[in-house]
Image (tube, helix red, strand yellow):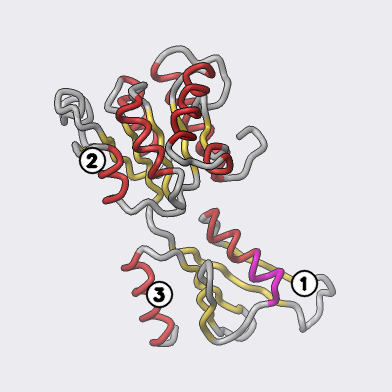
Amino acid sequence: MKRDITERLLAARKAGRPVALVTDLGTGLQTLVYEDAIHGGFGLEDDLLEEVRERLRQDRSGLIADLEEEDEDGVQLFVQTHNPPLRLLVVGAVHIAQALAPLAALTGYAVTVIDPRGSFATESRFPGVALHESWPDEALSALAIDNRTAVVTLTHDPKLDDPALLVALRSPAFYVGSLGSRRTHAKRLERLKEQGVTDAELARIHAPVGLDIGAVTPAEIALSVMAQITAVRRKAGAA
């Protein structure tokens, strides 16, 4: 690996910027592919570039072989993705959050639970989980939501959930979900509209949160939420 490529790769990883290292197995040349740029020893056709970026979004390292004619002009590329951690920011240190946090961690997410109510957001209730006791809108702004972040609001309290949604809906978060019945959500939409949220932004909210699997208990609801987050990230039809 050339020094320039190595330095740029390390800089991207330090900055938390997603990048894929692409190696041409025929020539040994390497190129770095970002979401919005490319740098290195060779260029890529549009279709290959899009496939590399899709693999980057999906965290899928591996071989891309463009060998339709099985001749010497065929291309074999190895893609190695380097992404910052996936994050789940949970507003509301409630029973569902207690079940959701370990499940999300098991599926590869760094979890932060946000709740200004000190008696809820405690180490004893959330062992090993990052806790943030600021108001949700302040916490979400400080945590710098990116496109590898999912946000879920669970408090059922408009004073906490609504400010959080205002920040989340105007961020690059790939998933925004909110607990509540359809009736509760309809009232929520009215309140957010009054605060200037657009129809396109409102359409981003997954509510009632989670896949419809008939979930009742906190653990079942947490499972449905994590399943929906996974489906959205993987672009599955079930989302």
Task: Name the outermost residue toward the top.
Answer: 216
Residue 49 lies in the magenta-colored region? yes
Q: Residue at x 50, y 16 (%)?
A: 215
State the residue position of label 1.
Answer: 67
Looking at the rendered image, the disc whose residue lies closer to the viewer, 1 or 2, is 2
Q: Which region is colored magenta?
A: 45-50
Distance in Å between CA atoms under marks 2 and 3: 28 Å
User: Considering the image in quadrants, where does the N terminus appear?
Assistant: bottom left
Find numbered disc 1 in the image and state the secondary structure of the residue it sits on: loop
Q: Residue at x 20, y 32 (%)?
A: 116
Is residue 128 toward the left or the right of residue 75 in the image? left
Looking at marks 1 and 2 on the same chain, the residue that comes earlier in the sequence is marked by 1
Q: Disc 1 marks which amino acid? A: Leu
Front one among 203 and 30:
203
Magenta portion: prevailing SS class = helix
Quarter of the view holding residue 26: bottom right
Is residue 9 toward the left or the right of residue 197 in the image? left
Residue 213: x percent and y percent? 57, 19
State the residue position of label 2.
Answer: 130
Distance in Å between CA atoms under marks 1 and 2: 47 Å
